[in-house]
Amino acid sequence: MKRTYQPNNRKKSKKHGFFARKGTKIINNRRKKGRKKLTR
């Protein structure tokens, strides 16, 4: 039987990565605040 979690880095970063978050308000707010690190 195949397990349910088949990790795929490309898919993961498309959904949750930096470029996925780039358009959101949170990133922009963190930028305005002058954060060193925007994302983990």
Image (cartoon, helix red, strand yellow):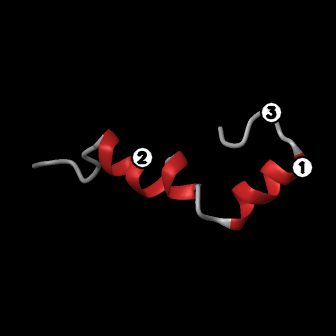
Q: Amino acid at mark 3?
A: Lys
Q: Would you name the residue on which mark 2 appears?
A: 13
> Which residue extends farthest right?
33
Numbered disc 2: secondary structure: helix
Q: Report the amino acid beneath label 1.
A: Lys
Residue 7's spot in the image, x, y percent? 30, 42
Query: Which labelled disc corresponds to residue 36?
Result: 3
Residue 9's tag is none
Crowding near the residue tagged with mark 2, few <14, some 14–19, many ≥20 C-alpha atoms within 10 Å: few
* Left or right of 24 on screen, residue 16: left
Q: Taking 26 as reference, is 8 left or right?
A: left
Viewer-proximal residue among 37 and 8: 37
Marks 3 and 2, Cα distance to the nearest angstrom? Answer: 21 Å
**What residue would you read off at disc 1?**
33
Helix, strand or loop at mark 3:
loop
Q: Is residue 40 above or below residue 24?
A: above
